[in-house]
Image (cartoon, coloured by chain):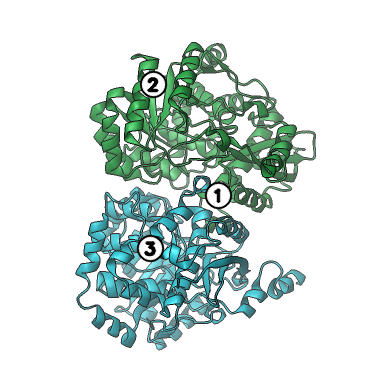
Chain colours: A cyan, B green
Amino acid sequence: MPGIKIINVKVRDVRFPTSLEQHGSDAMHTDPDYSVAYVVLETDTELKGYGLTFTVGRGTEIVVCAVKALSTLVLGKTLEEITGDFRGFYRLLSSDGQMRWIGPEKGVIQLATAAVLNAVWDLWARAEGKPLWKLLADMDPVKLISCIDFRYITDALTEQEALDILVKAKPGKKTREEQMLRDGYPAYTTSCAWLGYTDLQLTQLCSEALAQGWTKFKVKVGADLQDDIRRCSLIRKLIGPDNTLMIDANQRWDVNEAVHWVTKLAEFRPLWIEEPTSPDDILGHASISKALAPFGIGVASGEQCHNRVMFKQFLQASALQFVQIDSCRVGSVNENLAIILMAAKFNVPVCPHAGGVGLCELVQHLILFDYISVSASLSNRMCEYVDHLHEHFRSPTIIRNAHYTPPSDPGFSCEMLEESVQKHQFPEGEVWRDIEKQ
Amino acid sequence: MPGIKIINVKVRDVRFPTSLEQHGSDAMHTDPDYSVAYVVLETDTELKGYGLTFTVGRGTEIVVCAVKALSTLVLGKTLEEITGDFRGFYRLLSSDGQMRWIGPEKGVIQLATAAVLNAVWDLWARAEGKPLWKLLADMDPVKLISCIDFRYITDALTEQEALDILVKAKPGKKTREEQMLRDGYPAYTTSCAWLGYTDLQLTQLCSEALAQGWTKFKVKVGADLQDDIRRCSLIRKLIGPDNTLMIDANQRWDVNEAVHWVTKLAEFRPLWIEEPTSPDDILGHASISKALAPFGIGVASGEQCHNRVMFKQFLQASALQFVQIDSCRVGSVNENLAIILMAAKFNVPVCPHAGGVGLCELVQHLILFDYISVSASLSNRMCEYVDHLHEHFRSPTIIRNAHYTPPSDPGFSCEMLEESVQKHQFPEGEVWRDIEKQ
C-alpha cells in the first residue's frame, strides 16, 4: 500500500437518456436523464480507484468541473498518506480555504467531493483485496472513527460516544456477517410506480414484482391528489394488506399542504411519506412528523440532505423516523459513517436511498456495515432498489428474493464498463449523437 | 420595455489577488482571493444588464460553468416576459427538473442563479431609469409580492401577510426616502481587523476609521482565544466604551465551544457574535443564542445561509438576533425580498453582509428598500462596509460620515470597469500573468 500514489484524476460526464421512457420521473424531476460524474483515480501501480456521483442530466458538466478543481488536492498523494489521516484529508477537500465559499459542504462541491472520495474508498478496498463493506466491518473501531470529521456535530455525538457504539456492537458481528452472506439485506422496490407510468404499466410491473418475491413497494405521489388516491388504491389492492407500501412526494409540498395531502392517503397505510417538503426544512419535517404520528405514518428523507450537520438536526428535532443515507449527496463514506452513528445514537433506522446510476451498487456496502457493525437490527430497515442501468457496471448488484446479496469483488462496486462510459459520454458518445440526429 | 430581448449571456471569471496582503482573511478563509463570476446580459437594444456573484478564488470557474448552464433558460427571453411573471421565471431557474438535483437552491447553482438574476434586476432598473432601491421602493406591493416564490415558506409567511407588511409600511415612505437621501444608511466597518492583520495595522486602521467618523467596528476572531482577547481588548480601548463592537468567527466553532469562547470575550461587550458555527446549524445557533442572551450578546448569521427555507427556520427557532442578508448567496432580489419580509414578521433586524467584490454596491439597494418600504426602523440596524475594490466599479458606493449614500445611477450598481475585468480575468488577465511570472 505505501507504493500506491495517485498520478491522474480522470473525470467524465456520462448520461443515460432515461427521460425518453419516463423512468425515474417524480413530482419535481419530471424528465430525468440519469447521469454520473464518473471518476477514475489512476495510480503508479496497476490498481485504480473508481468513484462516481449521481446526477439527473443537465448540470453534470458543472459537477465534472468541480471534480477537476478538487483534483489538485488529490494528485500526488499516496493511499497511505490519505488513509493514515483520512479525517485530515476529508477536511482538506471539504474545507479548502477558497473553495469552501461555494459550498460549504453542500451542492455541487459536495457532490464532487463524494465522487472523489468514493473513488479513494474504492481504491483502498481494492488495495486491501476486500469489498468495501468487509473493509469497514473488519476495521478497528478507533481507525474507523479516525475517518470521521466530527466538526459541528459534537453537541450530538462525540468521538467517544461513536466509539462506544461500535464497541457495543462487536458481539454478534460474525453471526450477522454470516447471516448477510446467507440471506442478504432486505430491499424494497421503487421500479413499479414512477409518476410518469400509466396504471397499466403500474399493474403489470407490480404483478411481476410480487411474483419475484418483492414485499415492499414505493409509489411516487404529489402531482395530483386524485391521481394519487387512484394509484395508491390500485397498488394497495395489488399487493394486499400485509405487504408494505411507502409513498414519496419528492419535495412537492409546503408544510401544511403535506399534512393535508398525506392525511388523504392514510387509508392506504403507507409506512412513510418521503420528502414531503423542502429537504432543508428540518422544522417543517418535525411539524409533519408530529401531525402524521397519530396515523402511524413516519417521515423519511435524506437523498438531498447535504451533510452531517443537517442530519444531526433532523435527528435532534425528531423530524425523521427513517434516515435515508445516500452515497453521493454527502461526503462519501466518511460522512455517512458519522450519519449512521448519529442515527444509532438517536435510535432511528437507516433505510438508504438508492436507484439512479450506481447508487444501489454503492450504498449496499454502507447498509451492510450498518447492520453488521452498528445497528445490529433489521427492524423497520430496508434498502431501496431500482432495477435500472446495472448492466453498465462491472460488479452489478445481485438481488435474490428481494434481498441484496453482499458483493464479493474487491472495491466499492462502482467501476463502469468502459464501453458503456464511452457510448454514453455527453455530448460526444454514440447514444447522444444518435439522439441529436433524430 | 417590450422590445428588450436578451440575446447573449456573457460570463467571466474575475479574480483579485487579495491573499497577497491578507485582506479578507478570517478563521476559515485564510487566503481569499476576492473574485466574481461576472455576468453581462446583452440585449437587442443598447441596454445591458450587469450582475455578479462573489467568490473567494479557486472554484470561481465552477460558478462560471453553472452560469453557462443556466444561460439556456434566459436566452431569447424579453424583459417583459420575465418581469411579467418573475415568480415563474425565478422558479424556472431554481427548479429546472434536471438541474435542481445538484442544488436544490444551494451552493454553486444558487450562486450562479444569483449572478444571473442580479443582472436581470439591473437590466430592469436600467430600463426604468432608476437605481434598484428606487425601483423597489416605487413598486406596487402586489407587483413586488409577485416576484417572490413562496414555496416552502407559507407556514411562516403567506402572500397575504407579506402584502399586509408592505401596505402597513406605506405611510411615511416619502419621509424616509428623503431622510435616506439626506443622511444615508448607517454603516459599520470590517476593514480594520481582518484576522491576518498585525496589532500595529489594526491600531492604525482603527484610529483612521475613528477620525473618519466610524462608530461601529467588526473584529475577526476564532483562531486563537488569547489572540482574540488581546485584539478585542485593544480595539475596545481604541474605540472607547460608547462605540459598537461586533465579533465574527466565520464558522470556526462547534456549538459548546462557541458558547465557551464568546463568554470569555463578553467583557468587551460585543453586540453580536457572527457565524459562531456551521451556517447550516439552525438548532446550534438557537442553543448559542439562548446561552449568550444573559450576556447581552446576540447571534448574527446569513452570508452563507443558502436560501429562504433556511432563514425561515432560523427565525422560527429564535436562532438569530440579526439577519445578515447577502446579495449573492441566495436567489437575488427575489429571494431577499422574501427574507426581508420574514424578518419583518418575526421582528428581527436585517443587517446586511457586504464587502468582498461588489457586495456593498449591491446590498445597499436592498437595505434602503428595507428601511423605506418594510421595517421603517434603524434601531439595531446597520449595513456592513469594507473599503476594498470599489475602484473597479462604474458606480461605486459612496460613504459619507459612515453612512451609505443612496446610489443615483440607474441599475444595481455592479457594472465593472471593462479595463478592470480584462486585467483581472483568471487566468489570462495581465495581473495573473504577472503573478505567474514571479
- Percent from the top left, x then y, of residue B35? 60, 39
Mark 3 lies on a secondary structure that is: helix
- Percent from the top left, x then y, of residue A412? 45, 74
Residue bearing the label numbered 1: B108
Residue B79 sits in quarter: top right
- Ranked by sequence position, the earlier of labels 2 and 1 is 1
The reply to whether the C-beta atoms of the residues labelled 2 and 1 are less than 8 Å apart is no
What chain letter is assigned to the residue under label 2?
B
* Callouts 3 and 2 in the same chain: no
For marks 1 and 3, give the CA distance. 22 Å
For marks 3 and 2, give the CA distance. 43 Å
Q: Pick the quarter of the image with the C terminus of chain B.
A: top right
Residue bearing the label numbered 2: B235
- As rendered, which of B25 and A158 lies closer to the eye? B25
Q: Is residue B397 above or below residue A89?
A: above
Residue A438 visible to an observer of this rendering: yes
Image-based side of A436 in relation to A193, left or right: right
The reply to whether the C-beta atoms of the residues labelled 3 and 2 are less than 8 Å apart is no
What chain letter is assigned to the residue under label 1?
B
Residue B111 sits in quarter: top right
* Callouts 2 and 1 in the same chain: yes
- As rendered, which of B255 and A34 lies closer to the eye? B255
For marks 2 and 1, give the CA distance. 36 Å
Name the mark nearer the viewer: 1 or 3: 3
Residue type of the residue flagged with mark 3:
Asn
Residue bearing the label numbered 3: A336
Residue type of the residue flagged with mark 1:
Val
Residue B377 visible to an observer of this rendering: no
Residue at image position (19%, 68%) is A168
- As rendered, which of A343 and B312 lies closer to the eye? A343
Q: Is residue B174 above or below residue A18?
A: above
Residue type of the residue flagged with mark 2:
Ile
